[in-house]
Image (cartoon, helix red, strand yellow):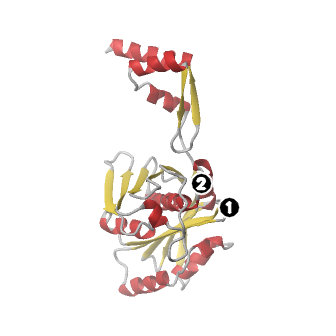
């Protein structure tokens, strides 16, 4: 089934629910980066959470997320454009820790506390908003929930799940974000809190034939919900050889000349999607000549 992000109104339009089904997206990201199981869970949860945070972006907007603790996985970075595209990378993909005391993947141990969660939101034509909070658990669901309350002043509940198979492949991945509207009744808030507490493990829900319906039946048991919009989501990187060529042009004349003389060319690799771009000696010479010509015009 195609990965998707669904936007829902529930409880007489007093509650906003975002659901992301992202098994193939996280599966592809894990394959690209060669992640081991604990790193896969940490990386996958970050990708899902980034999609959730980017769900209200307009055209040409961007949300960037960075998680950095003292654990072995190092820094995790993810970006989304609000159009269903997400990409990311992590410093150390080869992290496989023993299960924690609850018998689950030790995501907290992989990320490490203390740590920080940083979010940058850029809307087209607007000044970027940057928020940062300390990690409170390292499990990420709680951390993103805390971020929404503190930095964006939006009471929310965020749940994230990535289930990894014994062979290191991704079985399922997904998550949800629930937000209460400012005019919500106290009765609505209490009913929603009870529903969230009854959720239990998310992985079995995302393993079902219809995760969205099953999740909504729990979050809004009265059936009072309306699906407003759905969009496909996927791991996608807009990098190109042209963009990397522009980056090379920012190097000094000396560095470019050294690549030409010593290496007879250059290879650049995208952090996000691991695509390698080869630049021949002649291509570097053209970049250098253009750079020198530009300097001469100043």
Choose between 33 and 293: the one closer to the eye: 33
Choose between 105 and 178: the one closer to the eye: 105
Q: Circle 1 — which element?
A: loop
Q: Is residue 212 left or right of residue 191?
A: right
Q: Relative to 275, say whether 90 is above or below.
A: below
Is residue 284 at least partly visible in the picture? no
Residue at point 56%, 44% (across, down): 273
**Mark-to-mark CA distance, 1 and 2:** 12 Å
Report the quarter where the C terminus lies. top left
Residue at point 39%, 87% (across, down): 187
Is residue 235 at least partly visible in the picture? yes
| Pointer 2 residue | 30
Q: Relative to 188, say whether 252 is above or below.
A: above
| Pointer 1 residue | 167
Q: Position of residue 128 (x, y in %)?
A: 33, 49
Q: Relative to 222, say whether 136 is above or below.
A: above
Residue at point 42%, 66% (across, down): 138
């Amino acid at each position: 089934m195609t990965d998707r992000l669904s936007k829902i109104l529930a409880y007489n339009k007093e509650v906003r629910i975002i659901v992301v089904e992202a098994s193939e997206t996280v599966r592809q990201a894990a394959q690209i980066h060669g992640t081991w199981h604990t790193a896969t869970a940490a990386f996958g949860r970050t990708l899902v959470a980034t999609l959730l945070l980017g769900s209200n972006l307009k055209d040409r907007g961007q949300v960037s997320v960075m998680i950095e603790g003292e654990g072995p996985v190092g820094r995790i970075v993810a970006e989304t454009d609000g159009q269903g595209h997400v990409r990311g990378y992590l410093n150390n993909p080869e992290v496989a820790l023993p299960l924690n005391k609850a018998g689950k993947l030790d995501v907290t141990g992989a990320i490490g506390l203390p740590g920080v969660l940083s979010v940058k939101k850029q809307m087209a034509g607007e000044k970027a908003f940057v928020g940062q909070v300390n990690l409170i658990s390292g499990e990420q669901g709680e951390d993103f929930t805390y971020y929404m309350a503190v930095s964006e002043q939006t009471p929310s509940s965020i749940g994230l799940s990535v289930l990894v198979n014994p062979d290191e492949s991704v079985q399922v991945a997904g998550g949800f974000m629930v937000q209460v509207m400012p005019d919500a009744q106290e009765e609505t808030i209490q009913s929603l809190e009870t529903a969230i507490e009854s959720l239990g493990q998310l992985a079995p829900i995302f393993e079902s034939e219809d995760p969205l319906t099953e999740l909504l039946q729990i979050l809004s048991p009265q059936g009072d919900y309306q699906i407003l919009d759905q969009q496909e989501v996927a791991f996608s990187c807009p990098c190109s050889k042209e963009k990397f060529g522009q980056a090379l042009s920012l190097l000094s004349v000396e560095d470019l000349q050294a690549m030409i003389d010593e290496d007879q060319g250059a290879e650049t690799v995208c952090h996000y999607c691991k695509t390698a771009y080869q630049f021949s000696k002649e291509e570097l010479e053209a970049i250098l000549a253009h750079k020198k010509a530009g300097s001469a015009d100043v």
